[in-house]
Amino acid sequence: MPFHQKKKEGSDGLKIAFWSNSPGKSGVTGNLSCISILSAMIQPSKMVLFENHSNINNLGSMFLNQNSYDKLKEENSYFVENGLGRILNCCDMGDDVSSGIVLRTCLSVFDQRVFYLPPGGMNRDLLEFRLNRHAENVMDLLEQVCGTVCVDLSSSGLESSRKILKEADLIVVNLCQNDQLLSHFFRNFSEIRKKAFYIIGNYDPKSIIRKSDIVRRFGLSGSIIGTIPYNRRFADALTKGNVVTYLLKNFSCGADNINYEFISAARETACLFEQAKEAYGKEKIGGEGSEKKGDPSHAVCSGGNSVSDTREGECGSYQTGRNSQGTGTGAGTEW
């Protein structure tokens, strides 16, 4: 059935922006690719991912192996109105859009749960021009079909980034262990902090600036901040388009596995992320028992509230029979 571009009041979907004030240091795109897959394993649901920028290292290159990604780029270079381009075209024309059309413009990158909406052959300037006009409508359309919409935002001063940050229900702020950049964020982005969940990307537990230090210094709840450690094997998986394979292979690895520390930290962060989604989702629809904004400490999975620098939390088990990887179509100056 077709639906109109504007969302209905009381929508139980969620619009989430992944953003950083420290471009190139916190690994925003890699963090989103990791957390989206782990979240789908832990708390099965449907989500769609897209980006508002055109970079070589984007979500498509991390989810698809090089041959598949080259083919996708070649096809989209001839047919501009694929992927996000097609959704934007519907917005330009004021057309109703069916859920089938939306899903056919996406690629299923994991088990018909995580979908990627490629840019559709648009260059950087055209993408920004069109998305700047229709960012809100695009997010509303995708939210109605997939529930959760996650946007990988450019850290540069794009107008579409500002609009999406303002429209987002939850902002995943990707931090780095740099004192000046941390101070810059917490000093200047008060509006973002009101609806923020934090990930410390490329995390080094041996740094003098650890998670526990950031929690204490900036008065954060340990339930709204997680870590994604730097891991050479995960970094290789990102460059080879093997993120899903890497996470599936290592999801339940033991303490003797070289990937254990990374997976344990990433799983704990995914659990905390799911808690944040639930808390902000309840507040969005005004449901009973809504948690205090910015402190989503109620449990989705156990052990998620530790503020230590060790991995103490355990997440729910990944369900047997759901491990297939789908690849078919299917102060504030912040605003």
Image: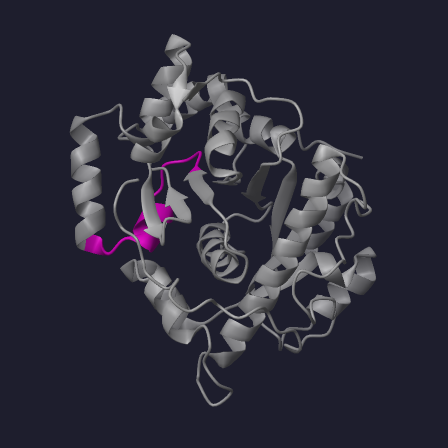
Q: Is residue 233 left or right of residue 186?
A: left
Number of numbered callouts drawn: 0
Residue shown at 75% from the left, 53% from the top:
296
Picture coordinates of residue 58, whole percent (x, y): 37, 46
Q: Nearer the viewer, residue 319 or 138?
A: 319
Residue shown at 16% from the left, 27% from the top:
78
Residue shown at 45% from the left, 78% from the top:
259
Residue 259 to residue 176: above or below:
below
Residue 245 to residue 117: above or below:
below
**Does the rendering let one see residue 324?**
yes
Please tell me in which quadrant of the rendered image residue 270 appears.
Answer: bottom right
Quadrant position of the N terminus in the picture: top left
Q: Within the magenta stretch, is there residue 55?
A: yes
Asked which colour scheme the image uses, the reply is: one colour
**Does the rendering let one see residue 158?**
no
Q: Within the magenta stretch, is there residue 329?
A: no
Residue shown at 53% from the left, 70% from the top:
317
Q: Is residue 233 left or right of residue 165?
A: left
Magenta segment boundaries in residue numbering: 51-66
Residue 84 to residue 239: above or below:
above
Picture coordinates of residue 121, whole percent (x, y): 26, 30
Q: Nearer the viewer, residue 18 or 138?
A: 138
Picture coordinates of residue 14, whole percent (x, y): 59, 38
